[in-house]
Amino acid sequence: MTSTLTRRRILQTGVAAAALTGMPQLAWAAGPVVKLRIMETTDLHVNILPYDYYRDAKDDAVGLARTATIVKAARAEAKNSLLFDNGDMIQGSPLGDFVAYRRGMKKGDVHPMVAAMNVLNYDCGTLGNHEFNYGLEYLQNSLGAAKFPLVCANVIKADGETMLKPWLILDREVTDEAGAKQKLKVGVIGFVPPQIVQWDKGHLDGKATTVDIVDAAEKHVPELKKAGADIVVALCHSGIAGGERKGGEENAALHLARVDGIDVILTGHQHFVFPGGKEFNNIEGVDAKAGTLHGKPAVMAGFWGSHLGVVDLELTREGNAWKVANFRTEARPIYERVDRKVVPKVESEAAVIAAVQADHDATLKYVREPVGSTSVPIHSYYSLVADDASVKLVADAQSWYVADLLKTTEYKDLPLLSAAAPFKAGGRGGPNYFTEIKPGPLAIKDMADIYIYPNTIRAVKVTGAQVREWLERSAGIYNQIDPAKGGEQDLINPKFPAYNFDVIAGVQYRIDPTQASRYDNDGKLVNPDARRIKDLTYNGKPVTDDQLFIVATNNYRAGGGGNFPGNDGSTIVLDAPDLTRDAIMRYIIDRKEVAPKADGSWSLVTPANVTMTFTTGPNAAAYQPAGIKVEKVGDAPEGFVKYRIVS
Ligand code: MN
Ligand code: MG
């Protein structure tokens, strides 16, 4: 277990501690040494069995049943251990939605997430932002049966008290390295992103407010120390981000690490892995290799049960005070990827599966039942050459969701656009890799066909000039068509991924592929004089460069994915907590029947003397695109079919 690196750190820390206190090294070396293992699960989101309900298929990369086996092994290795959960427990999978929307959660009922967690004997937990998604009564009923305590220091009720106990002390008898019993008081304090009051305004208005995470820590950690805590573990349902502290940070774990008295920071919310995740390289104060925040041990255990966070502490006693003399941190995965395939590292724990089997079976029925219907076919066979219903449905749902969250903000009067790209559009996925849903019922298991990525929703504030450049970047999907050459010419650049072909709903425009692309495949401006986007209008009027827009999009794009103009993270005005496919699902439930309409809001300029061709799947034969006419030319390699644009 002790690597060379760790051993080196033991020495360094030991020497430093002795030097700092001026004590002879023997004095601390002779005292008791306690090894304490602290384990974290986080962002479980009602993922218990290895199952993806959106696809209605097995998924070995998720599920607490498998994490439980890792917990068991990790416990067996350690003399003393504690297990914590860091929040986002009761929402985030169709199993959770089944309980919330179908089965119900009365007082005394046991939530399946809690039933599963009770099997593992957690020592304490905290709340995540998603705990508030179904209202406070639901939250209370769901966590009522938990056999472990919960703490949260920064949600305040109308009467000024914290909603939960802000902190508690776990009185534990531990075994030291000499085999003697020692008493240890482990202080535990919890935090949630203060943004819950915006994200769940409907549920929290008038009932609860929030306090900045660091402010809450500065208030309560001294109380914990006064109450005798030997060490303090922060259950911080918040992620790791650099930069100066402004107050009210959503991802405050790094700032929290500076608070005196906190010894260990369990982080989460971002669904990343720490130590290890490359997302945290080059942030001042973060050591993503050693797993430290300002020198203190920290972990983030991925999401949906993907990892178990492990912090091993070596505690020494000086007089009556216990000190962290050494530590190591680790995130243990439940699976590994071998040749792009998910291979589980352990079997699922039978007792955890048994605890939720009935709710799992009921959820399988639930995801196969219609939640609404579509009156039109939803397919992506022509999504790269014409306005298309599969992309429009996503754009419509995003607009609906974002408009609701922005309606009480300063952005409410800005024109709202919505950007979405075809995800399943053939390409390397093959000739059957297209979205295709026939008119009729829509079930939850269809969501993966409509929106395959677990993206979350974002809104950005951009200028008319940035909207134009955003579309120019998208338009790079087309090869340059040469009218002088004439004849048949391939339209689509196969090296350009379809997920970067953002269509922006809410504006009208045409794309002229006879011009050179302004941007290359990586989003680099390569032809500053070229323009493919023509006749860009909003409400029938030309879009001006300084006009302001809100664009609904996803976390990938808004954070700089695909290198799109106007999207580098700095333009984000709404960082929404929900998965895009959850928003689509709720939109369908809300509408009961959807009819996403390809309305020809964008179209291709078709030069007279060129026949532009593209390939699509063989099932395209059953449909015609909106706004243009196409004709089958013949079979293409690898099972694709070649079409030409007639007009
Ligand atoms: Mn989460
Ligand atoms: Mg969260």
Image (tube, rainbow, N blue to C red):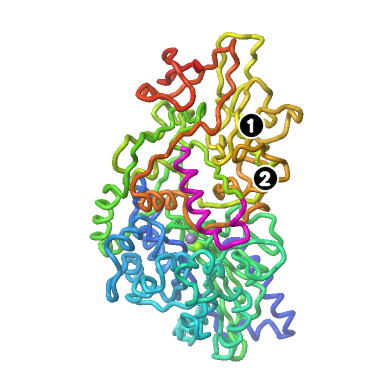
| Secondary structure under the numbered disc 1 in the rendered image | loop
Residue 355 appears in view: yes
Give the quadrant of residue 91: bottom left
Query: In the image, what residue occupies the spot 46% across and 19% down?
Result: 630
According to the picture, the residue beneath numbered tag 1 turns out to be 521
The label shown at residue 52 is none
Q: What type is the residue that disc 2 sits on?
A: Gly
Query: In the image, what residue occupies the spot 28% across and 55% down?
Result: 363
Residue 68 within the magenta-colored segment of the rendering: no
Query: In the image, what residue occupies the spot 74% across and 80% down?
Result: 20
Give the quadrant of residue 142: bottom left
Dot 1 alpha-carbon crowd within 10 angstroms: few under 14, some 14 to 19, many 20 or more: some
- Name which of mark 1 and mark 2 comes first in the sequence: 1
The label shown at residue 566 is 2
Across and down, in percent, residue 280 comes to 63, 56
Query: In the image, what residue occupies the spot 43% across and 41% down?
Result: 341
